[in-house]
Amino acid sequence: MPWINQVRPGPHNRFYKTGDIGRQLPDGSIIYLGRRDYQVKMRGRRVELGEIEHHIRNFMPAVQLMAIEKIQPAGRQESALLAAFLQLNDDTCSELLLPTVASNDSMAQVVYPANMDEKLSRFLPSYMLPDVYFSVARFPMTVSGKIDRKRLREIGATFSAQQLAELRTRSQGPKRQPSTDKEKAMQQLWAQVLNIDADSIGLDDSFFRLGGDSIAAMKLVAEARKQNVHLTVAATFQHPRLVDLAAWAGGVDPAVAQSIVPFSLLNINSDVDTARIQEEVAAGCNIDKDLVEDIYPCSPLQEGLMSLTSKRAGDYIMQSVLELSVSMDESALRARGSRL
C-alpha cells in the first residue's frame, strides 16, 4: 500500500488494527461510526462481550439467545453497567434462575442466575462479570434479522441504578449490614457517590457492581477526605467490597493535613535573609516579588542533576525538534513563544 510510506516512512511499518469503523469526509476528517466487533470499554478496561457470552453459554447451554450489552441506567449518565439479556427456551433453563424479582418492560424482567458470579469468576476478571441479567421473552430483531442491540440498551435504561441495587438485594436475601462506625461511614459515602439508598448497600457488596467506576472512585476519595477518612482510588479497586474497603480506610493524620509555614523549609533565621532570597528568586524568574508565595529547597537528586548540568552543558536537558507546516506564521509563533 503506497500510502503507508506517507504516514510512517521506513522499512519496518507496523500498524495496530483497532476494529473501529469510520468514514473519511472530503475535507480529510474522519467520523467515528462504531466497531466491527462487540468490544466496549468498561471502567477504563476493554471488554470483549463475545467472551462473556461464551462462558455464560457453557454454564447455561439451554439459553436460546443471549446478548451482552453496556447499558446506561436511568438517571445515571456517568456510569454504565454490563447487562446480560437471556432468552430461555424451556423449564430446565428456568430452574437455573432465582425467582423473578421485577419487570419494567413487557419484553424483559430482571433475574439473577444462581451462583453465576462464582462460576464466571473462575474464568473472567471481576470487571467482566455482568452487573444485571434480563430474561427476555422474545429478542427484538432488526429488519435484517439481527438482534436489535439498540432496543436492548433502551430496555435496560428503563431501570434506575437504585432499582437494580434493590432488586439484587431482594434476589440475594437479607444482606449483612454495617456494624462499626467505619463501615457505616463507608456505606453512607457509597450511597452519596452512587446516588442510591444506603439501606440497599451491604457489607459484601462491590462498589463497582453497584454502578461505580473510576470516576466514581475519584469522587469517593474526595468525599471521604471531607469527612477526614483516608482513601485512595487504587485501594477502591483492590478492595471493592464495602467490608474490605472500610477495614483498609483510615483517618487523615492532622499533622499531614496541616499547612506548612511559607519559607520555613529554607532554615533561614533572619527575615532579612528571607526577603533577600525572595527578591533573588523573583528576579531570576522575571516576576514580581509578591508573587513568590514560598520557596522549597532542592532534593539531593535535584542538587546532583544541577551540579552535573553546570559541569557538562546539555546533560539532562531534552531537546525536541518539530516540523512546522509551510503555512505557519513564523512571527505569530515567535510572539506566542515569547509570552511563555
Image (cartoon, rainbow, N blue to C red):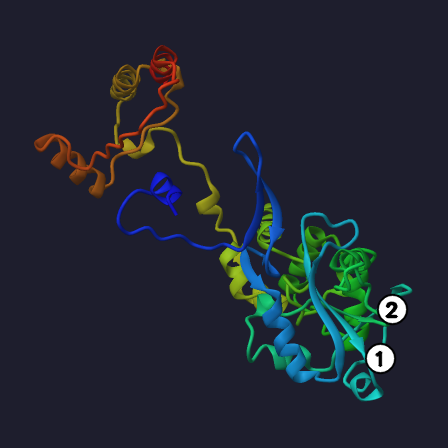
Judge by depth and name the residue closer to the eye, 324 or 120.
Answer: 324
- Residue 230's place in the image compared with 206, above or below, is above
- Residue 320's place in the image compared with 53, above or below, is above
The residue where tag 2 is placed is 102
Image position of 315 (left or right of 13): left
Residue 303: quadrant of the picture: top left
- Amino acid at dot 1: Pro
Report x, y in % for residue 57.
67, 80
Q: CA distance from mark 1 to mark 2?
A: 9 Å
- Residue 206's place in the image compared with 280, above or below, is below
- Disc 1, SS: loop
The residue where tag 1 is placed is 99
Q: Residue at x 35, y 17 (%)?
A: 337
- Amino acid at dot 2: Ala
Report x, y in % for residue 285.
30, 19
Q: Residues within 10 Å of mark 1 (few under 14, many from 20)?
A: some
Image position of 192 (left or right of 119): right
Report x, y in % for residue 241.
61, 68
Image quarter (top left, top right, bottom left or bottom right) of the C terminus: top left
